[in-house]
């Protein structure tokens, strides 16, 4: 499950696991890494944070086989979106070289995923403050726009895609905003078997 903060990923993951009981999710998440290492994140992220998160996510992906049924709350693509935002904002150390290197690392890791379910920000939903995620609406929308632009590139110009290995990329499915519609659409791709 990928997408900007406050797009309903964590809630949807819980619903997914309730519906598809043969799936699991790792107990430890990127949030745990941020808390354990006391890292700055979201709109205050650093290159150190982004490297730690990307490495953690890749290690998680590589610890599962294709036969395992694992659902993840975020993936390396999310990490790249935040790094791209930082580069665009000229945040210290987020150079073109850094982001390009991170994209190359992320691109290889995408081979370990079958589907990326993209959750978009719904302005009609209240922004939840859990004392962890960024609640600035402008920031949330900017991150959402980057996700959507990458999704559009993936669907409209796959031959030019620099984010996924040609012939070995996960399917990306944009989900509707309504909770039950999300589950119904996922059910078209994921069966109990």
Image (cartoon, rainbow, N blue to C red):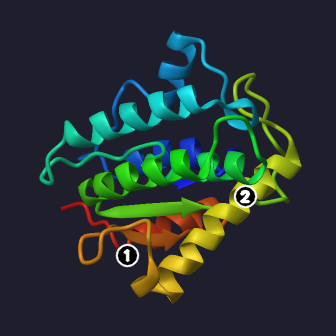
Tell which circle, 1 or 2, labels the residue nearer the N-terminal end: 2
**Horizontal and vertical percent for residue 100?**
49, 54
- Judge whether 69 appears above or below 172 on screen: above
- Say whether residue 146 is left or right of residue 79: right
Callouts 1 and 2 close, C-beta under 8 Å: no
Which quadrant is the C terminus positioned in?
bottom left
Q: Position of residue 14 (x, y in %)?
A: 48, 42
Residue 129's place in the image compared with 109, above or below, is above
Q: Nearer the viewer, residue 47 or 67?
A: 47
At numbered mark 2, what does the secondary structure look like: helix, strand or loop? loop
Residue drawn 55% across and 41% down? 10
Q: Alpha-carbon neighbours of circle 2 within 10 Å: few (<14), some, or many (≥20)? A: many
Q: Is residue 15 left or right of residue 81?
A: left
The one nearer the camera, 68 or 100, is 100
Q: Using the rendered view, name the quadrant where residue 145 is placed.
A: bottom right
Q: x%, y% of residue 75?
A: 43, 47
Q: For mark 2, what is the residue?
A: 121
Task: Look at 48% across and 45% down and name the residue there.
Answer: 74
| Residue at position x 45%, y 82% in the image | 160
Label number found at residue 188 = 1
């Amino acid at each position: 499950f990928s997408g900007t903060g406050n797009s309903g990923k964590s809630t949807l993951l819980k619903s997914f696991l309730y519906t598809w009981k043969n799936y699991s999710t790792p107990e430890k998440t990127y949030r745990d890494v941020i808390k354990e290492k006391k890292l700055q994140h979201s709109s205050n992220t650093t290159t150190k944070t982004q490297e730690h998160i990307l490495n953690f996510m890749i290690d998680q992906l590589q610890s599962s086989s294709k036969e395992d049924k694992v659902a993840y709350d975020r993936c390396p693509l999310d990490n790249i979106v935040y790094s791209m935002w930082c580069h665009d904002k000229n945040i210290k150390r987020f150079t073109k070289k850094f982001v390009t290197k991170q994209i190359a690392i992320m691109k290889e890791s995408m081979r370990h995923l079958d589907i990326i379910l993209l959750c978009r920000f719904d302005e009609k939903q209240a922004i939840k403050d859990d004392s962890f995620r960024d609640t600035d609406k402008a920031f949330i929308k900017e991150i959402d726009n980057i996700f959507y632009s990458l999704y559009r590139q993936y669907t409209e110009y796959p031959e030019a895609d620099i984010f996924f290995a040609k012939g070995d990329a996960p399917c990306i499915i944009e989900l509707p905003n309504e909770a039950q519609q999300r589950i119904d659409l996922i059910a078209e791709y994921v069966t109990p078997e």
